[in-house]
Amino acid sequence: MASEKDFEILDDYAGNRLNPQERAAFEKQLESDAELKNELSLQREIVEGIKTARKAELKSMLNNVPVSSIPTEGMSVAAKLGLWVIVAGLVSTGLYFYLNQDENSVGQPAITNEIKEENTENTVVDESKPAAEADQTEQPNQETPVQSQPKVAEKQTAESPAPKTSTPATVEEQPAVEPSTLDVFDPSEDAESAEQAAAEEIGPKVATKSSIAVETEVDKRYNFHYQFRDNKLFLYGSFEKNFYEIMEFFSNNKRTMFLYYKDNYYLLSDADQKVKPLSPINDAALLKKLRDYRGN
Amino acid sequence: MVYRVSSVMNEKEIFERICKGDEKALEFLYQKYYRMMTKLVITNSGTEDEARDVYQDALIVFWQKATSGNLVLTSKMSTYIYSICQNLWRKELDRKKRLSSEEKDTSVTLDTESSERETILAKCIDQLGETCKKVLMFYYFEEMSMQDIADKLGFANTDTAKTKKYKCKKKLDELVKAQYSEHDFLD
């Protein structure tokens, strides 16, 4: 008859809590104790049941997490790469028309040509990266002068896509395509103000880590708001500590900022010091761009 | 045009939180790498559903290893999770291949008794209180330390966690044994 102590060891054994010596000793004991052996198989079954239940719970938890859906299905990377080269020109042209139909647009034909060229190149470089590459936002500290861009791009395209070929150049190449897109969706039309000029000083064309100081605060009056005050961004609400990201774009003497939080993007306007509510961006085209920047 | 990003999220801190069993950190990670990981399956003849499934399974494997303290990260989390995804998807593709070539003969023989036992077991677990369920899951699946379990569930100390775990397990054992003997599953 197995003792209470035996059952305890048995439970530790089934729960993977014994050290190698204890395990060996217990396994020896098992050999000569049929009852214990029976009990062990039952205990293992129960532990398996608990694990299965937990796994199912975690899966259903993850299923409830909002994620961005995947646009393309069943295409190989190579096929997509080719497609992108062809489509890139079309996209930027489309982008141009898209921008132009908006009153806020500052698009000009001259700029469009430039965009078109860069876009083709950028896209090629971007797609040549393997999916395995970790997202680009994790290398924000590296700096590469933009002048070397074309060279780097050529080199990358020529190389076969091997992991870890991502360079800072890739990080900053994409933004060059975007300025007008972002402007279009920037509701702060007074953005050309003197305030913005200050932002420009921080050196052009370098992708670096954002210098914005961010603080999260709990204030009963504001459940999901933000405010720029004393050169700091304050986020009001029950923000999960450290689980947000501030994206800053500088172009045409303008700074446009976005908050990424829980798979949503929010425009941050620093035009004044008022407390403003955060409302997620819904525009599909802009969302896609922002996601591309973040690399997810 | 300049692009700056403040990566307020720090890889090391997220990993530490995951090791402590912080589900919010897991959700965060899930979102962060969703597109990157699912792309792997989708670009290798998988559907989006399969991709999601594989990614979730991979992330849960990672989570389980991290919470149990059995994982020392030598690469980035994304690299590690990606390699689990690769393995799982490769296995799944192999399984599919085998299924189609073997005419499904062998796999059809369903063990009705064991599936019935599984159902009973799941029902018994479901009958436990929420805290009991959590204690047992954290103990057996996450393999968390008693200290982490106490922290997570707000117990006064590790002794409380130990006692709770002991009692809950006893209760589950009794429920299962009663059900099994009712169905003549016990020898």
Image: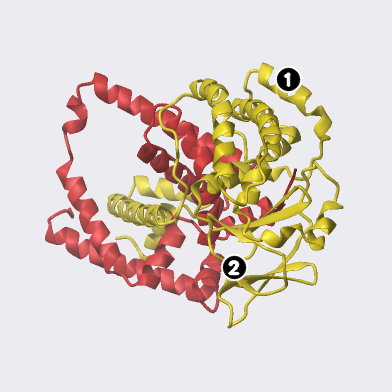
Q: Are marks 2 and 1 in contact (CB under 8 Å)?
A: no
Left or right: residue B39 versus residue B76 is left
Residue most toward the bottom? A220
Q: Position of residue A235 (x, y in %)?
A: 65, 69
Between B184 and A1, the one nearer to me in the picture:
B184
Chain in red colour? B
Using the image as rendered, state which of residue B11 and residue A192 is in the foreground. Answer: A192
Res A143 → quadrant: top right
What's the chain of the residue with tag 2? Answer: A
Residue in view at x 45 percent, y 28 percent = B43
In the picture, the disc for residue A155 is 1
The residue nearer to you, when weighing B124 against B39, is B39
Q: In this image, B3 relative to A16: left or right? A: right
Q: Amino acid at mark 1?
A: Lys
Crowd around label 1: few <14 · some 14–19 · many ≥20 (10 Å): few
Residue name at image x 39 percent, y 38 percent: B48
- Secondary structure of the residue carrying tag 2 is loop
Relative vertical location of residue A208 with respect to residue A194 in this rendering, above or below: above
Residue under label 2, please give it.
A239
From the rendered image, report the letter of the chain displayed in yellow: A
Category of crowding for the residue at label 2, using alpha-carbon neighbours closer than 10 angstroms: few (below 14), some (14–19), many (at least 20): some
- Say whether mark 1 and mark 2 are on the same chain: yes
Does any portion of residue A121 appear in the rendered image?
yes
